Image: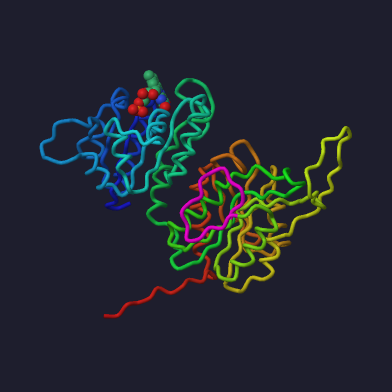
Amino acid sequence: MKEKKILCIVTGGIAAYKAAFLVRLLKQRGALVRVVMSKAATEFVTPLTFEVLSGNPVSWDLFAPRDEPGVEHVELATWAERIIVAPATADFISKSAHGAADDLASTVIAAARCPVYLAPAMNAGMWENPAVKRNVALLEGDGRRFVEPGSGELACGKTGPGRMAEPEEIVGALERSFAPGNLDGVRVLVTAGRTEEDIDLVRYISNRSSGRMGFAIARAAREMGASVSLVYGPVDVPVPEVDSAKSVRTSAEMKRAVTMAFPRCNLLIMAAAVADFMPAGKNPGKMKRGVKGIELELRPTPDILASVSGKKKKDQIVVGFALEEKGGEEKAREKIRKKGCDYMVLNVISETTGFVATTNRVTLFKGNRKVLETGLVSKVEAASMILDKISSDTRLKRKPKRVVRE
Ligand SMILES: Cc1cc2nc3c(=O)[nH]c(=O)nc-3n(C[C@H](O)[C@H](O)[C@H](O)COP(=O)(O)O)c2cc1C
């Protein structure tokens, strides 16, 4: 973190006192730290505390008179290499999700072009409020990164999720962002979303995959310098900007698109939740309701992961995903053996992990070996951690950079 320019934005929650520890830790690691507070934050901790800890003046007033001419919010946003909002209140998350800019803190975020991290802290009721969840999803869609709150005793006296991540964890996320694994010149193919398998003209079977994990991987791979192609089924979140994106609907369409694109990629990450079963025979019309129930015969869908793994060349890496109920480690190891892929990302089904959730807890296997185990982190963080590990694989082929000689 030496000489890295970090802007800490402190908003008005009890955890503002933890931000003092964060500033101290960042300074100890050699970072240059400036602090902006919301007006509400100054009710919890005085600006003087942050001035002393950061060694810099602290601002909170958008319209404060200045000794030198200049636009402070633009100057701060341009100065920062990383912005960390800690604690991030429900109010501040809502404001920044909607682009509001009515005080110094929110105006800096609105003007920021550098990576912005948020460490939410609030009562469990607020953290689980659907409006807060919506706003977090909006910000994640805009590429903002969350350092997920933990569960534990909260300032309100209750126990539950919403407790701000510890300062050490926040510093870890910032450090990782400065030294990400490198995927320069690597061609990455990512699959994301779910598939739909037709029963008749209007009905289908599918699953609840949102596309969040796959899209987070595509975005992170691009940030790490890869050229990224995406094959995605139906999703619930906006499609990220990548080098090429193909939308498909059924497992058969996904297989075709992946098989076509696979020979050109160095790294394939199959994060899509491809249906395991499809109706045995498609009814060409719309089935009538009738009085009796119907029996639906299902047959397995094409196994895309096994098929591409069987065709991969020595310098191609294939990563599969396994979604299991508790204790799926053995199943994940078995899946690697059966499918012949190189890595397997295991995620476990729970309220906060697997499908739908914005968070995940993953274990990465390389062959039989466990090489990464994350705590509960945002899917964006999980994606960075997975790619960080895989990027050091020596089999990864990179297109050499062209050297221009004068
Ligand atoms: C004692 C007290 C504690 C609070 N703690 C939190 C909190 O932990 N998280 C939160 O989102 N809001 C909390 N609030 C509410 C915020 O302070 C309030 O929404 C405020 O408008 C936030 O302003 P800001 O987002 O501009 O900092 C608390 C309020 C009080 C009075």
| Picture coordinates of residue 76, whole percent (x, y) | 24, 42
| Picture coordinates of residue 200, whole percent (x, y) | 77, 46
Horizontal relation, residue 9 to residue 336: left or right: left
Nearest to the observer: residue 37 or residue 211: 211
Up-down relation of residue 373 to residue 128 (above or below): below
Residue 248 in magenta stretch: no
Residue situated furthest top in the rendering: 157
Nearest to the observer: residue 327 or residue 303: 303
Q: Quadrant location of residue 88? A: top left
Up-down relation of residue 20 to residue 224 (above or below): above
So how many labels did they put on this image? 0
Residue situated furthest right in the rendering: 292
Residue 234 in magenta stretch: yes
Residue at (56%, 51%) from the top-left corner?
Answer: 214
Magenta segment, prevailing SS (helix, strand or loop):
loop
Residue at (40%, 30%) from the top-left corner?
Answer: 89
Residue at (30%, 80%) from the top-left corner?
Answer: 405
Q: Quadrant of ligand 1?
A: top left
Quadrant that contains the C terminus: bottom left
| Picture coordinates of residue 129, whole percent (x, y) | 52, 27
Up-down relation of residue 88 to residue 393 (above or below): above
| Picture coordinates of residue 116, whole percent (x, y) | 37, 44
Residue situated furthest bottom in the rendering: 406
Residue at (54%, 68%) from the top-left corner?
Answer: 266
In magenta, the rendered stretch is: 232-247
Nearest to the observer: residue 369 or residue 265: 265
Horizontal relation, residue 82 to residue 192: left or right: left
